[in-house]
Amino acid sequence: MAVDRSALPPLGDLPPFHFPRIDKRSLPSGLRVWTVEHRAVPLLSVLVLVRRGAAADPRGQEGLAAIVGDLLDEGCGALDALALHEALGRIGAQLDTEVGADATLLGLTLLSRFADRGVALLADMVREPRLDVRDFERVRDLRLNRLLQIRDLPPALADRAFTQLVYGGHPYGHLSIGSEAALRALSLASVKAFHAGAYVPANVTVIAAGSGSHDDLAALVERAFGDWTPGAGSAANEGAVLAVPPVPATRLGVLHKPGAAQSELRIGHMSIARNHPDYLRLLVLNMVLGGQFVSRINMNLREDKGYTYGVRTGFDARRGPGPFLLQASVQSEATAEAIRESIGEIAAIRGDRPVTRVELETGRAALTRGYPRNFETAEQVARAAAQMALHDLPDDYYTTFVPSVLAIDEQAVTAAADRHLDPSRLLTIIVGDRDRIGPALTPLALGEPFDLGVPA
Amino acid sequence: MNIPFVHRTLDNGLDVLVHQDRNCPIVAVNVWYHVGSKNEVPGRTGFAHLFEHLMFEGSQHYDHGYFQPLQQAGASLNGSTNADRTNYWEVVPGNALELALWMESDRMGYLLPALTEAKFSNQRDVVLNERRQNYENRPYGLAGMALVSELYPAEHPYHWLTIGAAEDLRAAHMDDVRAFFQTYYHPRNASLALAGDVDVEDALRLADHYFGSLPPGLKPGPVTPPAPPPRSRETRLVLEDRIELPRLYLAWHSPNLFAADDAELDLVADVLAGGKTSRLYRALVYEQRVATEVAASQNSRELSGYFQVVATAAPGRTLAEVEAAISLEMQRVRADGPTPGEIERGVAQAEAHFISRLQTVGGFGGKSDQLNAYNVFLGDAAFFDRDLARYRRADAAGLTRAANQWLAPEQRVALSVVPRGKPELALDGSAPVSVS
């Protein structure tokens, strides 16, 4: 039978998908142990979520949480750094440490047959890192070197400038890496104090996903973490984190990089926290506006105008307020025009071009029909559980996600856009060659560009 | 351990590989065309990748952009071009398999009628933006170009990177697109892999239905440039860039993909710079602190490989110190070989890596992509376990021999990348190079 090319083939019924059950236990110490059965391949993924991140850095010590994260695998218990990494290497284990604003996440992926050894090493790293002074100084030097290299990295410069301006003195107002002055001011005593206060069972969820029953996986974690004694822990600065930062006075900041081949752009403003009831509506809105290839802003700037390799938007929702943010690298000569078009699209979706039925369906479909592929591997499922733990999401969050999104209509999306997008508050950051962008910015009426100086 | 599959070749020559995995209700569609920047000619570099972009701009029977119907169906999709091959993939919910096959087969058979000058010039702009964003505006972003243009003579297609030269992209023409499509984009030069939650017979039937009627095309001949001449004297180069910390690149010719010593050199790279216990990390970053980071890799491809060591100098330290430390450690590996512990760790890491490759059905590096890689490069999609066996049987003697044969200091290219205006920070005797 010949292929009918007069129309696209119809989609059949969507196959059912069931998010795996997360078994949740708590130990007397306050430690939470969550398990997910995932038997596809003989690998185990174990995540340790510590609910303290860069937002917990004391003022003047920005970068502390990240240094502590770096030091976890620089030796622990009876092992120095080299012995620890030899032990990890012998079992083919892959270790990752991420220090975000709200949390520190350690991840270990390893062959199931080495599960006990791997989880024991992970527990030692979390509970008994050596925090040796020479390792501290070496790790701090590496971070200082990284800060030096960031001076030539337009995406990092743009992120840092946007974060500082949009948050001001808020606990979220710095990147995890901190600043040179703050890093130099750190001491080993502050490292030890941070670890003692943050890395206590009450702040930690251990998530194990892999082959084995819930009982087996929980027992595995308990063998390594079960005798962890509850520490006092430091108080969380939740009040300061949840506070809404004031709107910055500046609307346009330019960081001059002579000879830059492109302009790195950030455009955004403060928006919602993760637990806001409009969160899912804004997810749908974002799919239409700039969250995927076929979104309005990418189709405009890339596929119509050819100004960029790609542009994306997102709501960076956290425990406290996070920004709505557009990110792109654009042709220098088209910088002003790209900003005008971007702000125009943001204004239009809450103004004269609200989300249409077709766009709504495309946006919802991208979130719902493709949902299962987010949970293919043990690590993906474990990370989903970590999001649940970090944001106190309800137990049924992943099982109700699809029907909840499908229940959102155009009016709900437009109303959410009205509430949470405000073109008059948008802050624009440009990292690029001012001489090639220059006067074209004036007609944008964003006010006098704030000079972010040269990279420092 | 393997990726079980069924292989059928359609009447028009298209290879179809089907692997069933019921773990998640998704199906991966993956198409490889055996064409990359190695098939380009001087003056038209970057063209294979520009062509890949045009594959997303619509085909005769659906001329509205490739992404819309697929993203609407819940698909994730992308494509990529390297020196040797171009791949395209969708990961779709099981009910959208036919849609993905319809779309892939339409652009395999009917791309040209939908091609317009406007699409062509738009995507050329997009690619020029990609080049500026990922190469010109990125610290050390032009180092790779400087290296390969020294490692390979001008008539060798590895002389340029896949992104190509900006002036060549600007010189490309619509006629080039037509000729390229007719030469390389047809069933005889392609391989289709389907993996995931699908019945094998259904998948084979659907593949035949959508692709079976496409005209076969002529299989292009192999690319056979003369082997790059052996290097017997170290070459030193310096490139100035907008950076803070000088960085040293050392590169050697090395075995082709899957050739003898390829896996051994992969393991040597691991001994040298895989993790914090590796020789170079320990010496340069941990103990002597002359470098902030160090990496090593065996980059093997169809026509040739190159082995690379890269280290960034710590503030206040020189590339001469970095070079001396690297050379000393590499000399020790060549003289004494790796320890049993290093072999044990390298093999364990390789095994874990191969098992982790079994976790996803689609996307870059997923099981469908691996089946196509083995099929296109070796004509043997069942190679997964023999690929792993290359690592399992590696021993200290083999690594030592490979390191001695391929990684002698006099055979290397040493590229110093230094801050603009400071060529004196390069290794002594470095000749300036200019790339853009």
Image: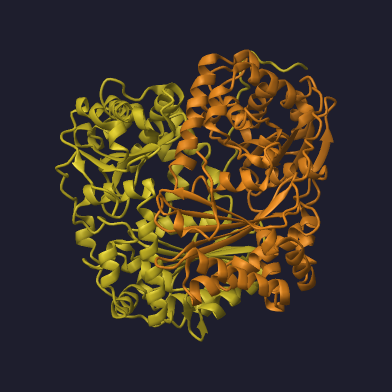
Chain colours: A yellow, B orange
In the picture, measured across the screen, residue A291 lies left or right of residue A163, that is: right
In the picture shown, does residue A342 fall above or below B260?
above
The answer to whether residue A252 is seen in the rendering is yes
**Looking at this view, is A93 or B267 the one in front?**
B267
Q: Is residue A348 left or right of residue B139?
A: left
Picture residue at 24% right of the left edge, 32% below the top: A418
Quick one: quadrant of the N terminus of chain B? Answer: bottom right
Q: Which of the 4 image quarters holds residue A195?
A: bottom left
Q: Vertical placement of A189 versus A8: above or below?
A: below
Look at the picture and state if B228 lies above or below B392. above
Place of residue A452 in the rendered image (x, y in percent of width and height, measured from the top left): 23, 46
The percent position of residue B48, horizontal first and vertical second, equals: 64, 31
What residue is rendered at 83% in x and 25% in y?
A: B12
Which quarter of the figure has residue A416? Answer: top left
- Residue visible at 46% across and 40% down in the picture: B136
Between residues A11 and B428, which one lies in front from this camera angle? B428
Please give the name of the residue rendered at 18% of the width and 50% of the height, measured from the top-left corner. A245
User: Relative to A454, does residue A445 appear above or below in the rendering?
Assistant: above
